[in-house]
């Protein structure tokens, strides 16, 4: 019998992209709810409890409600794409490559919290350096990022694409999260193994999908003797053998004139770069990904496949 998958919120941006990735697969059975019935609590509860894996593509409160609906049914496993459970100690964090044991934790977990798009890049850059001892956990980190506007869901998509929208955004690029209280900061701190919450400066560009996350450092703030080469080696060693996360070789990145935010749009992979001029004492770590790929829907499908392989 094929495992049953229910995407609660399949008509939203993340859910639609998951459905696209699942199209043509004959190894699972997709349970679906008509769009007109998406707020039918009884129907949702029935489908949630009929599933082997429920993927929640919902706002935080609705995700908590859905999890409560499955609480008494130990057979149902859950992947949640909201921020509701990303720092919950009883939930596996769904970033399989963040350390060597994480894929196994996801594979055996009942509850998996899909990472946020920005934290996937930030944690992907920072955590290996803390684990290797190059970056002190007490260092005060800054994270700067730009995302495609699909990361804001249907509302932001409409504001960016519909010139008749009452809150139309005509700007090619804008900053937000200006009070420095973005919802992704807690998971950056906890899963980045940091003692302090990072300063996070997010922004949105006029492109649908894609993302760049930057974490700059002064080398003399890091462990004694740290160089561009040792930083790169720590990242390369951490992700050795991984297919989805690639650390771009130093010789390949040193001559790059630019990094394009849309270069991995439509893909479920992530590339990590180490930029800097030898002798300058400055480093810029960069993650390149699709905000709806490895940053959302692609990661959810990856986590589902790990859970199905248990």
Image: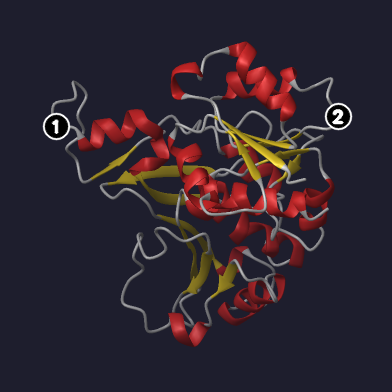
**Residue nearest the observer in this picture, 42 or 258:** 42
Seen from the viewer's position, the closer of residues 77 and 288 is: 77
Residue with the mark numbered 2? 74
Q: Residue at x 39, y 48 (%)?
A: 147
Q: Would you place residue 69 above or below residue 278 in this image?
A: above
Residue at 63% x, 71% y: name it: 243
Residue 113: percent from the left, percent from the top? Answer: 68, 39
Residue 250 is labelled as none
Assess whether mark 2 and mark 1 are in contact (beta carbons under 8 angstroms). no
1 vs 2, front mark: 2
Is residue 168 visible in the rendered image? The answer is yes
Helix, strand or loop for disc 2 = loop
Residue furthest bottom as drawn: 251
Real-space CA distance between mark 1 and mark 2, rounded to the nearest whole angstrom: 48 Å
Pointer 1 residue: 163
Q: Work out whether residue 196 can be spotted.
A: no
Q: Secondary structure at mark 1?
A: loop
Is residue 215 positioned above or below 249 on the image?
Answer: above
Q: Residues within 10 Å of mark 2 (few under 14, many from 20)?
A: few
């Amino acid at each position: 019998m094929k495992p049953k998958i229910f995407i609660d919120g399949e008509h939203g941006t993340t859910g639609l992209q998951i459905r696209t990735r699942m199209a043509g697969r004959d190894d699972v059975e997709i349970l679906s709810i008509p769009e007109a019935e998406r707020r039918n609590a009884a129907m949702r509860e029935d489908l949630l409890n009929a599933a082997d894996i429920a993927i929640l593509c919902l706002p935080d409160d609705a995700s908590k409600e859905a999890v409560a609906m499955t609480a008494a049914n130990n057979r149902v496993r859950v992947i949640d794409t909201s921020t509701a459970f990303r720092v919950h100690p009883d939930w596996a964090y769904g970033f399989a490559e963040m350390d060597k044991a994480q894929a196994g934790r996801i594979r055996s977990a009942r509850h998996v919290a899909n990472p946020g798009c920005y934290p996937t890049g930030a944690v992907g850059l920072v955590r290996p350096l803390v684990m290797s001892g190059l970056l002190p956990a007490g260092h005060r980190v800054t994270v700067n990022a730009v995302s495609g506007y699909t990361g804001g869901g249907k509302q932001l998509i409409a504001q960016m694409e519909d010139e008749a929208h009452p809150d139309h955004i005509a700007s090619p690029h804008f900053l937000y999260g200006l009070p420095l209280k973005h919802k992704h900061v807690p998971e950056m701190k906890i899963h980045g193994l940091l003692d302090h919450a990072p300063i996070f400066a997010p922004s949105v560009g006029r492109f649908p999908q894609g993302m760049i996350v930057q974490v700059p450092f002064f080398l003399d703030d890091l462990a004694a003797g740290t160089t561009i080469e040792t930083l790169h080696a720590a990242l390369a060693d951490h992700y050795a053998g991984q297919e989805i996360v690639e650390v771009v070789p130093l010789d390949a990145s040193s001559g790059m004139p630019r990094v394009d935010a849309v270069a991995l749009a439509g893909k479920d992979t992530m590339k990590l770069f180490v930029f800097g001029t030898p002798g300058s004492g400055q480093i810029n770590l960069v993650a390149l990904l699709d905000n709806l790929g490895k940053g959302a829907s692609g990661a959810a499908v990856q986590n589902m496949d790990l859970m199905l392989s248990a």
